[in-house]
Image (tube, rainbow, N blue to C red):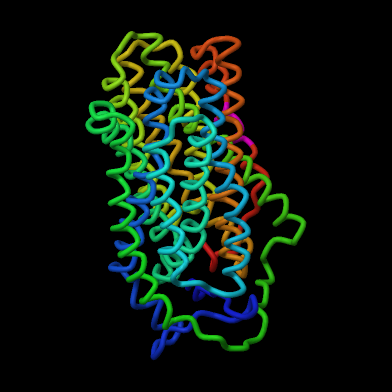
Amino acid sequence: MNKPVVVSEETLTEPVVVGGVTPVAKSAAGPAYIVLAGISFSHFLNDTMQSLIASVYPILKDTYALDFAQIGMITLAFQFTASLLQPVVGHYTDKKAQPYSLAIGMASTFFGLLLLSIAQQYLVILIAAALVGLGSAVFHPESARIARLASGGRYGFAQSVFQLGGSFGTSMGPVLAALIVVPFGQGSIAWFSSIAGLAIVILWRIGRWYAPQIKAKKTAAVQAHPDAPSSRRVAIALLVLVALLFSKQLYVSSLSSYYIFYLIDRFGVSTQAAQIYLFIFLAANAVGAFFGGPLGDRFGRKIVIWISILGALPFTLALPFAGLYASAVLSVIIGLIISSTTSSIIVFAQELVPHRFGMISGVFFGVAFGIGGLGAAVLGKLADHTSIEFVYQVCAYLPAIGLLAVFLPKLPRHVR
């Protein structure tokens, strides 16, 4: 049976206590579906707003005569704030949970969108992207903790429900950009601040559910399972998981940031049509992200990690040589396969370090995704010196990093 989730208050060993419910009863009761639905919908709203940044790249590029390297720097500015601050936020909330931090952090996204809608200089665009990234830094670690708390022991399922909202939110950005931002211009980005307002209300309500469950209570330190891997193997496994998530995220980032330009340059499609093709890929990403967690709960996270990363390799290798419609089909297959690994990687990492949920979530949502942003900037520079098609030929080999999964340890059965 899965152990109850531990959330720290004053020390790392002070658990979240649900009033009137014992840990065993809580697990038996199953997931708190209303809370999972609320946090997933909030993730949908959060990532919808964030994905607007990449979706309006063609408008910003044409309006301000930006090159690919400058486009990559916008991605870096967004990802860098999230990368730098997410582990810090997670580490702090491991010690002292902040139930209303989600609503407060969403305000940063609100102001970032308003600033992006009126930005007339490249530096202001970078600042606006960084503010949206700051909102992401605050949102992800604590919301991932709440999803786990509401899981009822079905950790992979809860993480997949949480990821599903974010993935669909990411996929909606290109569609909304095509329908609203492209016809009405940069100023229309301000309209999406209303989405941030709705998210603030929902997250405040979730904070009210979360707050009473935080109870400072001194307890004994969590005892390690006798079959648990050693601290050295845990450290190696965490590095491997970061590398695996990096390979997955860098490939997805390469499509999110440059797929529109690739389709325009190679096939001569319109900006709006290219955004629809990007939506198709990102929607497939969302579906794959949902199924990865439950499959990990049932068959083991390690085998899902193996299949989802290495399984995408034949299709990523074929993509640079495919025609327009074949590219769309391949992008769907790649999205379904490669995205199924995210939930398993994050839950695997949480189970390796069960007393640091916030920090681990911050590291994997922040650092690994941030490294993907840095890689996107490097890919932009490479595209300026070669071609966007050459970039996709290079990125096609990224899933081969999945071979590192051989170094992952076998976890004790009770934590899977």
Instruction: Indicate yes or no whether the magenta region holds residue 201.
Output: no
Left or right: where 80 falls relative to 274: right
The picture places residue 383, in percent across and down from the top left corner, at 55, 15
Q: Residue at x 30, y 39 (%)?
A: 172
The picture places residue 287, in percent across and down from the top left corner, at 33, 42
Residue 252 visible in the picture: yes
**Residue 346 versus residue 54 in the image, above or below:** below
Q: Residue at x 43, y 18 (%)?
A: 319
Q: Main secondary structure of the magenta part?
A: helix
Residue 351 visible in the picture: no
Q: Residue at x 51, y 85 (%)?
A: 215
Depth order, front residue of 114/272: 114
User: Which residues are drawn in magenta?
Assistant: 398-403
The picture places residue 44, in percent across and down from the top left corner, at 33, 50
Q: Residue at x 70, y 57 (%)?
A: 234
Depth order, front residue of 216/20: 216
